[in-house]
Image: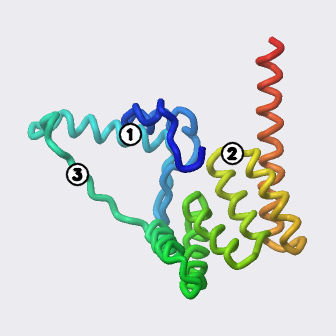
Amino acid sequence: MSGEFAVADVDRSIGERFAAMALRFGDRIAVGTDECEWSYAELAAKSDALAAQILTSESSHVSSPIAILMRHDAPLIAAMLGHALVATEDPKNFAEAKRILKVAVSRDNQDPFAWYQLGIIYDREGDDGRAALATAERSNLEDNPKLAYASAQMAMKGIPPNTPDWLRAQDISMVSKTELAKKDKRYRDEKNP
């Protein structure tokens, strides 16, 4: 379902979608900068507090537009710049995009979008092992252990053994395999109560 939204999700507001994510991934990092990290649960609590402040303020009207200014973080900006360079589809821009995206994921390795863009660069370079590792990283962040496991296994075949990238692929492989086993056990338990 890549690039598409489920009909049920399209009919829900952004707030409803975020609340569902906060319930599902409450302990995962939702926002991270050099100065702080907030889990989905923490971000939900902070946004609820902000909404309550706005709604109780004397100048607030339900129909009034509201804008909130937040500082953009360097890894987010780097990922967007890397994406812009990749989107040109000009091979002359790929080396710069790769450099920028590697910095972005080194500072914020929790950004699936940056991993996706870096994977495109590795694919265009013919580095199938690292393209698979980038897909494994992204899939792991997106709670897709089946694709994360398969991609990590592929990465381990295409990256020299015992290098940092190979060891990272091995880590993702083990974590994903464990998650798949947990899901399989839950499925069996549900089927045979």
Note whether 71 is above or below 27 in the view shown. Answer: below
Q: Mark 3 sits on what residue?
A: 67
Q: Residues within 10 Å of mark 1 (few under 14, many from 20)?
A: few
Give left or right: position of 166 versus 35. Answer: right
Total numbered labels: 3
Dot 3 amino acid type: Ala
- Badge 2 marks a residue whose secondary structure is loop
Residue 144 tag number: 2
User: Residue 129: image x %, image y %?
Assistant: 79, 69
Note whether 36 is above or below 122 in the view shown. Answer: above
Dot 1 amino acid type: Ile
Quadrant (top left, top right, bottom left, bottom right) of the C terminus: top right
**Coloring scheme used:** rainbow
Q: How crowded is mark 2: few (under 14 residues within 10 Å), some or many (20 or more)?
A: some
Residue at the bottom extreme of this rendering: 92
Query: Residue at the location (54% across, 77% down)?
Result: 89
Q: Mark 1 sits on what residue?
A: 14
